[in-house]
Image (cartoon, grey):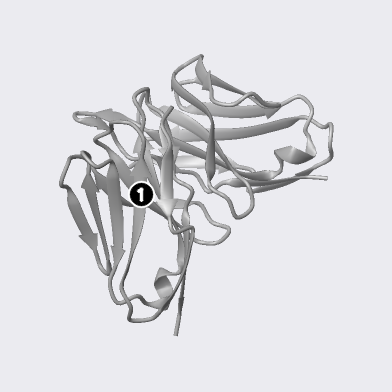
């Protein structure tokens, strides 16, 4: 069966520090991978998505970047965090089946607080 | 650009009552998903709707899709406290992007 791992679960970082969040998927090949951010009490904002190794699409200009060094690994990074980067970060995956993509399956999320 | 809107944003309802959450989207899509999120938790998939007229039911929740109207509904029957959560719809965009609605925060009280 497929599983998705996302870590860490919580993170408190000072302004100006770097960030690296990692997400890995097991049990499937060539998944679509996504990074979403959710501000407190708000909806989900799509940050990045990837349809293959090294292929990253960015949805909003921001202080963050993403990389996909391996088929089932997706990394969210920042060189210098801002206060506005605080939020709940969710990694997700889906695959293409006959008739279209499956629904997205989500990791447990990382709650990032920038202080 | 694909936009997905839900209403209402907040819903406070009494146990035993019925209500419907609406999800409208702006461009053509045949695939729509409903998710549930408990406070502080990740998202759990509820329904996958893959064609016009699709209807799925699980317990007290029923979801439907009208692709011509670009509308999906999530109907709650005889609400119970355990249904209290935030519900999101999501639409598959044309380029493998999954775009989420604003969410509906549901609170069920005795």
Q: Quadrant of residue A67?
A: top right
- Is B51 drawn above or below residue B84 in the view shown? above
- Which image quadrant: the C terminus of chain B? bottom left
Chain letter of mark 1 equals B
Q: Quadrant of residue B20?
A: bottom left
- Residue at the outermost left position: B53
Q: At x 35% / y 54%, what residue is drawn?
A: B22
The percent coordinates of residue B30 (x first, y second) are: 24, 35
Q: At x 37% / y 26%, what residue is drawn?
A: B96
- Is B105 drawn above or below residue A22 in the view shown? below
The percent coordinates of residue B18 (x first, y second) are: 31, 73
Give the left or right position of residue B80, taking residue B38 as reference: left
- Residue at the outermost bottom position: B110
Residue sitting nearer the eye, B6 or A87? B6
Q: At x 47% / y 16%, what residue is drawn?
A: A53
The percent coordinates of residue A112 (x first, y second) are: 69, 45
Q: At x 15% / y 46%, what residue is drawn?
A: B53
Q: Which residue is mark 1?
A: B23
């Amino acid at each position: 069966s497929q599983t998705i791992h996302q870590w860490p679960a919580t993170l408190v970082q000072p302004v100006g520090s770097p960030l690296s969040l990692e997400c890995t998927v097991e049990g499937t090949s060539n998944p679509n991978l996504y990074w979403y951010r959710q501000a407190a009490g708000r909806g989900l904002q799509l940050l990045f998505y990837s349809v293959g190794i090294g292929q990253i699409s960015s949805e909003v200009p921001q202080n963050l970047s993403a990389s996909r060094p391996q088929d089932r690994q997706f990394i969210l990074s920042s060189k210098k965090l801002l206060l506005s980067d605080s939020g709940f970060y969710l990694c997700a995956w889906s695959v293409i089946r006959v008739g279209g993509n499956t629904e997205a399956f989500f990791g447990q999320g990382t709650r990032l607080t920038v202080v | 650009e694909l936009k997905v809107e839900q209403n209402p944003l907040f819903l406070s309802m009494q146990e035993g009552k019925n209500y419907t959450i609406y999800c409208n989207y702006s461009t053509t899509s045949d695939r729509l998903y409903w998710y549930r999120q408990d406070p502080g938790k990740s998202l759990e998939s509820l329904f996958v709707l893959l064609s016009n007229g699709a209807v799925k039911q699980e317990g007290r929740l029923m979801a439907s899709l009208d692709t011509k109207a670009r509308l999906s509904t999530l109907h709650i029957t005889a609400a119970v406290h355990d249904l209290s959560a935030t519900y999101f719809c999501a639409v598959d965009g044309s380029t493998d992007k999954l775009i989420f609605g604003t969410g509906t925060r549901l609170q069920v009280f005795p």
